[in-house]
Structures are given as C-alpha cells and as structure tokens.
Amino acid sequence: MNMKEIRIIAKAQGVKPLKRTKAGLIKSIQLHEGNFDCFASARQQACSQACCLWRGDCFEQAIKAA
C-alpha cells in the first residue's frame, strides 16, 4: 500500500498523518484501532493476525529491516 492510501486511511480514522514514515503512520493507526503497534516486526513471517490490513506490507518491511 502506498503512502497516499495510508494517509487516507489515517485521516478517515482521525489519525493525523503529520510527517511520519510509512511504518510510523501504520503503527499509529494500529494503536488508534486498539491493536498492537507491531508493523514490520514479523521477522520470520510469523504472525497471528491473519486478517490484518497491513500483513503483506508488514512482512516486506520486516525482511528489509533484518
């Protein structure tokens, strides 16, 4: 998902995008939703949140960060 799409989701949920990184903005959205701010932390592509909107991007970012 690109930043423009993420900013739209953030604004719709009342999260101010400000000048955050992709990961930072997604983590803010996750916290606002009442979830763990775990984006990009699935180092071994293991995650119990199968229905997470960010799942695909999360795994990609976790691999890049490793």
Image: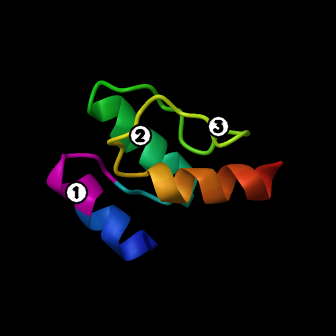
Residue 20 visible in the shown view: no
Query: Which residues lie in the magenta part?
Result: 9-16
Separation of disc 2 and disc 1 at Cα? 11 Å
Is residue 43 positioned above or below 58 on the image? above
Residue 56: percent from left, percent from top: 50, 57
Front-lying residue, 11 or 47: 47
> Going by the image, does 12 lie left or right of 40?
left
Tell which tag, 3 or 1, sits nearer the viewer: 3
Label 1 sits on residue = 11
Marks 2 and 1, the one that precedes in the sequence: 1
Helix or strand or loop: what does disc 3 sit on? loop
Marks 3 and 1, the one that precedes in the sequence: 1
Instruction: Kindly give the residue lying farthest to the right in the view shown.
Output: 66
Residue 21: percent from left, percent from top: 57, 58
Front-lying residue, 33 or 16: 33
Label 2 sits on residue = 28
Residue 60 visible in the shown view: yes
Point 65% across, 56% down: residue: 61
Residue 31: percent from left, percent from top: 37, 30
The magenta stretch spans residue 48: no
Helix or strand or loop: what does disc 2 sit on? helix
Q: What's the mark number on residue 41?
A: 3
> Going by the image, does 5 lie left or right of 48?
left
Q: Amino acid at mark 2?
A: Ser
Residue 57: percent from left, percent from top: 53, 59
Q: Quadrant of the N terminus?
A: bottom left
